Amino acid sequence: MVLLDGKKISQDIKDELKEEVSKITQDGKRPPHLVAILVGDNPASQTYVKGKMRSCEYVGYSSTLMRLPSTISQEALLKKVETYNQDPDVDGIIVQMPLPDHITPQEITQKIRPGKDVDGFHPLNVGLMTLNFPCLMPATPSGILELLHRYNIPTKGKHCVVVGRSRIVGRPTSILMSRGGNPGEATVTICHINTPPEELKRICPQADILIVAVGKPDLITADMVKEGAVVIDVGINRVPSPETRSGYRLKGDVEFETVSQKASHITPVPGGVGPMTVAMLLRNTLNAYNQNLATVGEIIPE
Ligand code: NAP
């Protein structure tokens, strides 16, 4: 069994980006600049954002962490986003989810200028991705594909089962896996909350590549996995643990101990898909900086 080491691959990507940024700054140009907006004080969100800021520092980007109170109105948040949309010294903007209940996340996602949407959540980027045009790609799905690519895992003609259909992980991953290109060209089945449990148990063992993004610890057990399958576990669940100081530990959606004995390749949690998401966010920020995808920002009516 091969452990798909997202921590190592993401470090490789960060080192590649660091080198590119160093060339940029040696040429006397400013480095890429990422702005992260954090609303409220959700502890998990704070950890994620701090990790992203640390990674920016590592590769040599400028970064701004804009903390806003959970009481901020939607209108005020939209105004803040617009300020960064208009700022020519800002290349990428992320708004850390989840947002307080009185704010509609889609309104915020759609406000971010598509050319600065380094999370790849804007409907225009999602549409361009679906049609296989250049765009800022959703970070977690492209991190999954990058992992498959760097481990030379063939996907063409394989049966890929994606469990979960969220806007940010399951659905875009299913599109990327079925698109033309490498990785891609897979036959894709998507399962979701209305897939009856017995159907899930019937479909998952057919997967050559099983990608799980649900948020339910140990949903996938060894009897649901084909011998030799590639298993990508996106889930990050906090489960109680008396052995840790925090009182919890992180667990995926896949029962690692048993499934790893059947899989040919598997991602650990933590250390699998999570670090890849950050690496792809950084790569998107450099792409946005280079305006490789500049037309993305220009064709949307403002
Ligand atoms: P989400 O928005 O809650 O989506 C979960 C999806 O799973 C939904 O499509 C839901 O179906 C489906 N689902 C729920 N129960 C199911 C079941 N029993 N069988 C089959 N499908 C089921 O979550 P998400 O944002 O996609 O995140 C999923 C997990 O990945 C979470 O643990 C999250 O923390 C983690 N995550 C990790 C990263 C990373 O970088 N590693 C990034 C993002 C998320 P419906 O659509 O019908 O509700």
Image (cartoon, rainbow, N blue to C red):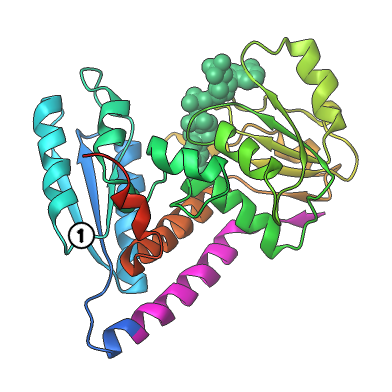
In the picture, measured across the screen, residue 189 lies left or right of residue 217, that is: right
Above or below for 300 versus 281: above
Q: Amino acid at mark 1?
A: Val
Q: Which residue is mark 1?
A: 90
Q: Residue furthest right?
A: 227
Q: In the picture, residue 27 is in which quadrant?
A: bottom left
Q: Position of residue 91 (x, y in %)?
A: 26, 60
Above or below for 25 versus 223: below
Q: Name the residue: 82% across, 44% down.
A: 263
Find numbered disc 1 in the image and state the secondary structure of the residue it sits on.
loop
Q: Position of residue 222 (x, y in %)?
A: 82, 31
Foreground of the two, 120 or 133: 133
Q: In the picture, residue 269 is in which quadrant?
A: top right
| Quadrant placement of the C terminus | top left
Q: Name the residue: 37% across, 66% down.
A: 286
Q: Position of residue 106 (x, y in %)?
A: 32, 27
Which quadrant contains ligand 1?
top right
- Taken as a whole, is the magenta stretch helix, strand or loop? helix
Q: Name the residue: 81% across, 50% down.
A: 156
| Quadrant placement of the N terminus | bottom right
Foreground of the two, 33 or 272: 33
In the picture, measured across the screen, residue 148 lies left or right of residue 217, that is: right
130 within the magenta span: no
5 within the magenta span: yes
Q: Name the residue: 77% across, 28% down.
A: 221
**The residue stretch that appears in magenta:** 1-23
Residue 237 seen by the camera = no
Q: Residues within 10 Å of mark 1 (few under 14, many from 20)?
A: many
Foreground of the two, 116 or 261: 116
In the picture, measured across the screen, residue 242 lies left or right of residue 145, that is: left
Foreground of the two, 298 or 154: 298
**Circle count:** 1
